[in-house]
Amino acid sequence: MTEEEVLDHVKSGRVFYLSPDHFDERMMTVAEMRAIFSYSYFNAFWQYEDPPCAEKLHALLKSGLHSNGFIACRDVLKYPVLCELFAYEIMKVIERRLMIPQRAPRIDAVASSAYSAISLGWEVARFMSNKYNRTIAHVVVEKDSRGNPTVIRGGIDPGVNVLILNELMTTGGGSTLETRKAVLTCNGDDPAPTVLEPAFVLVHRSKDYTLADGSAVQPVFHFDIENFEPEECPYCKAGSEAIKPKVGDGTNWRRLHGQI
């Protein structure tokens, strides 16, 4: 299926009828991904594309940073059909980057963090188990009391090669790094499993192309979305109000989109 045909599917409301088969011969484009996420049923993509002004709002992130964009992956990935579709796109990037003949590493487990990356990681592990390794496992990295993905119940065998996967990366010190650190420390004082590089990220909306520890990251889709410390935010300086995009009954999300 061509890009034009895919965009027509989305425009005409047939987004749930897209499947991995439609992208067998090529990678999904950024325009196609954005169209799917922006589809009115999900309304999961927002970006401030005009010069800063007082009339338009901007986003206040969980980290306390301000931003000119927000991508709600969970609102798309909660649908199995679309989770499978985007897992297939990650698989293509993993194969291109890692599965090189005679040099491909053995992948024993895929680790992904709560919450939105759980289903995505499971689907990627399923694809890999069907094609490369029937015994591949999916490891869930649960959140701790502070909301950070640091908990792996039962640890991971030291002989295991683990692939790190996340649905979204905003900074090099965020949940992708926390997931990697959780795998490396999950056995306590016992030997750690091996973490493969790079970590794979579905949506990359960061200026950082490595994690804070210097390890590599490979995105599938990249967007030039910026983050700012509140005192340096050009949108605040222009009089724009910062609001949390996804709280309560969705009022803030509609406000960001200018719907109310």
Image (spheres, rainbow, N blue to C red):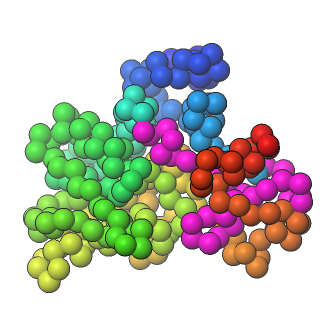
Give the position of the C terminus as an image quadrant: top right
Q: Is residue 67 visible from the viewing direction of this image? A: no
Q: Residue furthest front?
A: 249
Q: Can the viewer see residue 250 in this picture?
A: yes
Give the percent coordinates (x, y) of residue 108.
16, 53
User: Observer-nearest residue: 114 or 160?
Assistant: 114
Main secondary structure along the magenta-highlighted residues: loop
Relative horizontal placement of residue 122, taking residue 134 as reference (left or right): right
Q: Position of residue 169 (x, y in %)?
A: 50, 59
Q: Which contiguous range is marked in magenta? A: 49-78
The total number of labels drawn is 0
- In the picture, measured across the screen, residue 97 lies left or right of residue 190, that is right
227 vs 160, nearest the viewer: 227
State the residue at coordinates (39%, 53%).
115
Residue found at x 84% / y 62%: 240
Q: Is residue 77 left or right of residue 194?
A: right
Residue 19 falls within the magenta-colored stretch: no
Residue 109 lies, in percent from the top left, at 20, 53
- State the image quarter where residue 258 is shown: top right
Q: Residue 105: which quarter of the image?
A: bottom left
Query: Of residues 249 and 190, which is closer to you in this image?
Result: 249
Q: Is residue 227 above or below residue 125?
A: below
